[in-house]
Image: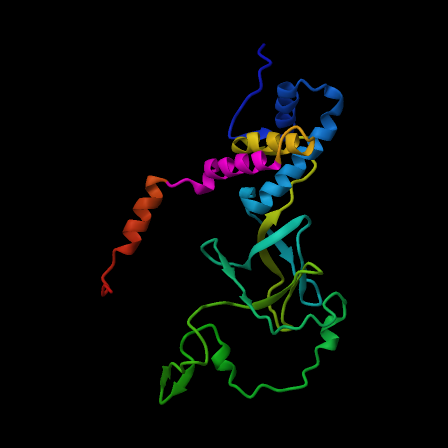
Amino acid sequence: MSTEPQLGKYIPLKMATAFFSDETDRSEGDQDRYWLLALRAMVDLNFEFGAEPETFKIPVNANKTANFPTGCLTWSKIGLLNASGEVSTLKINTGLSFLKDTNPNRLNYLTPQLVDSVSILTTAPFFLNYYYNDGYYNLFGAGTGLVQYGECHIDEANELVVLPSDFRYDSILFEGIFAPQREEDYKIPLAFLEAVIAFIKAKLKMDTMQNYYGEATKARRRWGKKKVTLQMINQVIRESESMKLRS
């Protein structure tokens, strides 16, 4: 039976450390140390370009906040699921207060001091915001045509999605980049193999960080998200063709 490593689009992180040990003629005794260095390499690569977004459905707390999923490095999209299976994003409203947002009784502290006199119709998610003489019209400047079914503000320090007190949904979708986990079978893209090895060498003073940056650049170019396919080109061409005035 063959004992050669099986290479595919993804490989176990421990395979990268095994390749490093073989190349540098290192013993098996320090494998855990090399594995931790390789994990640090993946954290660095994920921050730059390497991570694929993950999406979670998270519950809304009773105080109208939602906690970030564990291990979140940065969020990319927060919203609700529509009938087409797409994420309909929430409006980012930086005016929403973080007042007592970690307190279970947060809503008790949100007693309004001012009453907005603008008609609620102007905040509806439709670009028809004025009714007159049996017809709807647009009041320009009172709202946009972007359809969004809620709003939120992001408390990065406390890792909370802060929602208004009248938010009507019991869960939201949270898409983001997450830290690699210390798992025995944690896998990495094969395209990152040389970059991970270069990082281990640099941290062990066997090479320079400059060489790691070079390998990371090569990895980014090889990574699938940078690849241009004929399907993508055809889609761009077809979507640009329509019955419209040309500028």
User: Which image quadrant for residue 241?
Assistant: bottom left
Total number of numbered discs in the rendering:
0
At horizontal 38% and vertical 81% (from top left) the residue drawn is 138
Is residue 151 shown in magenta? Answer: no
Horizontal relation, residue 82 to residue 43: left or right: left
Residue extending furthest toward the top: 1
**Vertical relation: 87 (above or below) 105:** above
Q: Quadrant of the N terminus?
A: top right
Residue 64, percent from left and from top:
67, 67
User: Which image quadrant for residue 34?
Assistant: top right
User: Viewer-proximal residue, 247 or 155?
Assistant: 247
User: Viewer-proximal residue, 193 or 141?
Assistant: 193
At horizontal 75% and vertical 65% (from top left) the residue drawn is 102
How is the structure coloured here?
Answer: rainbow
Horizontal relation, residue 230 to residue 18: left or right: left
Residue 62, percent from left and from top:
71, 66
**Vertical relation: 140 (above or below) 2:** below
**Vertical relation: 233 (above or below) 123:** above
Residue 93, percent from left and from top:
57, 70
Q: Quadrant of the C terminus?
A: bottom left
At horizontal 65% and vertical 33% (from top left) the residue drawn is 202
Read off the magenta span.
Answer: 209-228
Residue 6, percent from left and from top:
55, 21
Main SS class of the magenta portion in the image:
helix
**Vertical relation: 79 (above or below) 190:** below
